[in-house]
Amino acid sequence: MKEIIYITKQGTKIKRKDNQIAVYENREKIWSFPINRIDKVFVFGNIEISMPAVNFLLSKSADIYLLSLNGKFKGLITNTSLGSNYNLRLKQYKAFLDNDKSLQTAKFFVLEKINAVEKYTGEDFSYYKKALELSDSYNEILGIEGGVSNIFFQNFRERLKDNSLGFTKREYRPAPDPVNALLSLIYSMFYSLLFSFLSAKGFDPYISFLHKKRGTHASLSSDFMEIFRVKLSDFVLFLFNRGIFSKDDFISSESSYYLKEESLKKFVDLFHQNFITDRKYSKLFEEKVNDFVGILS
């Protein structure tokens, strides 16, 4: 089985070594992995990668994801941008250009979020569901999504045991506390995976319905993120409430927080165990892709 590789050791170099991808620190090889077992490579922060390594990975259809040290998605190196299923893309473009179909598709993602938040909080969200059903504009749909998101993060804050972490609300760019920093990191990592999965399915990840595209933002990935955001956030809550992560795992710089190098390695290991090795999330993704295709048709 192929695997996703995460490289977090700062100041290292990624090179090709025979039939392996190897990481070097001060010219000494500290890690290597067989190329035929690599599916994707995530590279965090100040790490160099040689062109022979890039070409070798691309020849084996292994994508390379470039992220900042705090997990912000910077770019993707891939040998193909989209899967071969152009029929799906045609349906996607047609739905995007049809105002009624576009609104219906945006509602799909918001309803998924409402259902997830309702289950998480145990509250009745019938009002929001009815309002979503009756909404006939993009701004109304966004307003409903924003209201539900606010309720979720209020509940999230109430469940957070350690008040010294300084979390009061969801904020980013910069992340003003460790909780927001870890939320941004896990969202960014999952966004990167969604980009890959959606592209492989044949969708255009830049054509979306709920999130409007800005810059190089692959906004369809953000649309699908709403299906998983509650689960991802709850995992962050679990890490802090169980003491697996604390303020000591973070560095504060220019009013922003990010994980220390060893803590980042610990986090990506936990992320891999809980969201990659555990196949329930890939199964959920497949299920929701089928629902999405049904709406586009």
Image (spheres, rainbow, N blue to C red):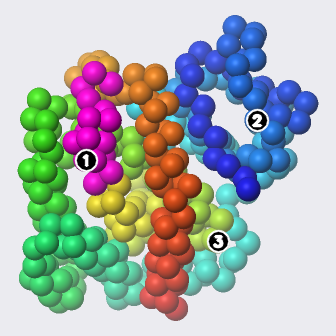
Q: Which residue range is magenta in the image?
A: 233-249
| Amino acid type indicated by mark 2 | Phe
Looking at the image, residue 133 lies above or below residue 248:
below
Which amino acid type is shown beneath numbered disc 3? Gly
User: In the orientation shown, which residue stands out farthest toward the front?
Assistant: 242
Q: Position of residue 9 (x, y in %)?
A: 57, 22
User: Badge 1 local density, few (<14 within 10 Å), some, or many (20+)?
Assistant: many
Residue at point 40%, 22% (across, down): 260
What residue is disc 3 on? 202
- Considering only order in the chain, which callout, 2 or 1, is on the residue closer to the N terminus? 2
The span from disc 3 to disc 2 (Cα, nearest Å) is: 29 Å
Q: Nearer the viewer, residue 184 or 91?
A: 184
Q: Is residue 287 visible from the viewing direction of this image? A: yes
Quadrant of the frame with the N terminus = bottom right
Callout 2: SS:
strand
Mark 3–mark 1 Cα distance, whole angstroms, equals: 34 Å
| Label 2 environment density (alpha carbons within 10 Å; few <14, some 14–19, many ≥20) | some
The tag earlier along the polypeptide, 3 or 2, is 2
Of helix, strand and loop, which one carries label 1? Answer: helix
Q: On the image, numbered disc 2 is attached to which residue?
A: 33
- Write down the residue under mark 1: 237
- For the point 59% across and 15% down, the residue is 11
- 97 part of magenta stretch: no
> Are the residues tagged 3 and 2 within 8 Å (C-beta)?
no
Q: Measuring 47% from the left and 72% from the top, which residue is drawn there? A: 284
Q: Secondary structure at mark 3?
A: loop
Residue 270 to residue 278: above or below: above
